[in-house]
């Protein structure tokens, strides 16, 4: 149990994870989280993916989508801004705000409200800092930083929601 504070009240918690040493490990890290979402479904969730260019955000998202059972090619939403993947349990919105320049563009994307969907949704938002305060707040934040070794990525996980208790216990053990 790496997300502390679940007893009476909930408090945000940060957990530094062991370094990921390859693209494959980063995908597996994302795939494991997705598996935990599938095994302990929750309503809907917002996950912020933070980090510099090339830090592993899109690679993590690809692994996450593979773990959700989406085995086709996962496209980066760098130019399309949003790619939607309908999986067995969730509608996953992979969102990249890197190319957003104005608040008006963010508001037009309607990321401040839940999408109209019959399935629960998961927002995976890359570069969320470009959309705050006009996007939904995160249940989970993952900050990727570059390590000292080639291809090494160091994820820090910030839990902001008690609804993810079972998922985090599964993912981070």
Image (cartoon, rainbow, N blue to C red):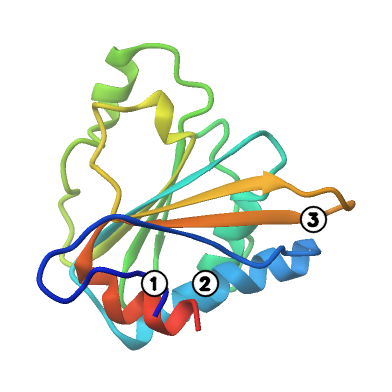
Provide the residue designation for mark 1.
Answer: 87
Dots 3 and 1: beta carbons under 8 Å? no
Specify few, some or many for label 3: CA neighbours under 10 Å numbering under 14, 14-19, or 20 or more.
many
Name the element at disc 1.
loop
- For marks 3 and 1 on the same chain, the one whose residue lies earlier in the sequence: 1
Residue depth check, mark 3 versus mark 2: number of the one nearer the observer: 3
Q: Which numbered tag is attached to residue 56? A: none
Task: Tell me the distance, in whole angstroms, between the alpha carbons under discs 3 and 2.
Answer: 26 Å
Give the residue furthest to the right: 150
The quadrant holding residue 104 is: top left
Whether residue 37 is visible, yes or no, is no
Task: Tell me the distance, in whole angstroms, between the alpha carbons under discs 1 and 2.
Answer: 6 Å
Specify few, some or many for label 1: CA neighbours under 10 Å numbering under 14, 14-19, or 20 or more.
some
Provide the residue designation for mark 3.
Answer: 152
Q: Position of residue 109 (x, y in %)?
A: 29, 30
Provide the residue designation for mark 2.
Answer: 70
Q: Position of residue 79 (x, y in %)?
A: 56, 30
Dots 1 and 2: beta carbons under 8 Å? yes
Q: Residue at x 41, y 35 (%)?
A: 128
Name the element at disc 2.
loop
Q: Nearer the viewer, residue 22 or 109?
A: 22
Name the element at disc 3.
loop
């Amino acid at each position: 149990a790496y997300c502390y504070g679940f007893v009476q009240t909930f408090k945000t918690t940060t957990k530094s994870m062991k370094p990921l040493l390859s693209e494959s490990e980063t995908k597996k890290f994302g795939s494991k989280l997705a598996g935990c979402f599938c095994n302990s479904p929750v309503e809907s969730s917002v996950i912020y993916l933070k980090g510099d260019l090339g830090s592993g955000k899109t690679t993590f998202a690809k692994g996450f989508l593979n773990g959700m059972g989406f085995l086709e090619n996962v496209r980066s939403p760098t130019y399309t801004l949003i790619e939607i993947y309908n999986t067995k349990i969730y509608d996953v919105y992979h969102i990249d705000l890197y190319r957003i320049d104005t608040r008006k563009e963010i508001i037009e994307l309607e990321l401040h409200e839940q999408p109209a969907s019959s399935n629960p949704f998961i927002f995976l938002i890359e570069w969320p800092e470009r959309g705050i305060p006009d996007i939904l707040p995160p249940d989970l934040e993952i900050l990727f930083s570059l390590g000292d070794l080639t291809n090494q990525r160091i994820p820090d996980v910030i839990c902001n929601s008690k609804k993810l208790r079972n998922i985090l216990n599964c993912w981070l053990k």
